[in-house]
Amino acid sequence: MDLDAYRAAAQAYATELNGAHLRRFAGLSARWDPVAIHARHVALWSDDAIEGLRDAGSRPLLRFAVEARLHARLAPVDAARAEAEAGEDLAGLTAALAAEEDPVARVELGERRLDATVRRLTPLAAEAVEQVRAEARALGWPSARAMWAELQAVDLGALAAEAEALLRATAPPELPAWVQARHDLPRWRAVGRPPAPSLAAVLAALDLAPRFAIEDAPRPGASPRAFCAAVRVPDDVHLVAGDGGALLHEAGHALHLTHRPRKAPFEDRHLVDRATSEGFAFLLEELGGADPLRPRRLAAALLHDLDVLDAGAHPGLRDRYGNRMAAATGLDWPTAPWLTDADPLLSSADYLRGLGRAHALREQLGGPGWHERPGAGRRLAALMAA
């Protein structure tokens, strides 16, 4: 396989897809047709391409090809899910939960959200899970778990054991007394935590000039949640502004990508180690205050995702999910989202390892309060470029 030709084709695909995603969800365009974009680049994840990447021993490019193939297969399901979420106004229900002071009214809003989840989203989530499991077998892996273990270069059994150990060794965090159930979390995030510092203040304190474009103009159709769009790394990276905590997290990704070496191969620019990238994102997000629920919730999410990958959309996992999440968070937790909360692409493994990387990075930078030390931004930039 001509890896240089493959890299050039992969760059063209990433630029087209991420550029279109940026324009749509920054409110710059109403057009968003990922199915058509995938169709123009289907050769990147053909059987021959995947076998060629296996033979070449390029794990980052192999993961890229397999994930692109899965995203292409799942694009119609994702579109149906987005249509269902819009039709049920789930974003509006979540915003209403964040604004609602009355706990009884929050219960009602939460029930409406769960009803929509069961009626509209659960069948689509089940379809996505089974498609990923089937594709893993079609590509020659014995299971989806085996596929992700190889592509992520991680011992998932050992990682699951670490997650279980974390849950045994720690206790659910103490939250305000009025936070009793999952439906209270949007309100808690809105008013129960200190406001995050502005991105400008964080970058100024680190003496880092953003090398990425910041899209913060209010536009119809723009995503309410911050995201990072890597159109071409490191020179064309965009941060679309949104809520504070997510903004700092996504800024961590944008900083990391814009410090990648310009002349490095595609995989060393665009396909940075996912856990390391999440480590930088969590490190920056923590400057706005760490989420006390996150470690235990991610540990429980990983265990649930592995269960779903192993057993598929088996209804016996529903109660296990509810019990596990309730034990992890200390909150009343519904069983209804057991499939919609599952991620068959196993991002939870990257996130959980990313928390560990954030801790290691913090220690490399001098421990707690690292960002207040002279030269902190320079040292952070050097780690991002390594």
Image: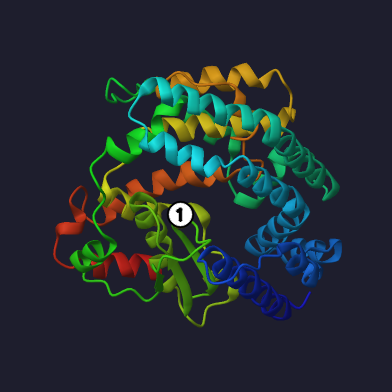
Where residue 52 sits, quadrant-wise, is: bottom right
- Residue 76 is situated, as x and y percent measured from the top left of the image, at 76, 52
Q: Residue at x 38, y 60 (%)?
A: 252
Quadrant in which the N terminus appears: bottom right
Which type of secondary structure does the marked residue at label 1 adopt? Answer: loop
- Residue 85 is situated, as x and y percent measured from the top left of the image, at 62, 43
Q: Residue at x 35, y 50 (%)?
A: 245
Task: Give the amino acid at mark 1.
Answer: Pro
Total labels: the figure holds 1
Check the image and name the residue furthest to the bottom.
263
Quadrant in which the C terminus appears: bottom left
- Look at the image and tell me whether residue 300 can be seen: yes
The relative height of residue 333 versus residue 282 in the rendered view (above or below) is above
Q: Residue at x 52, y 58 (%)?
A: 273
Residue holding disc 1: 224
- Look at the image and tell me whether residue 181 can be seen: no
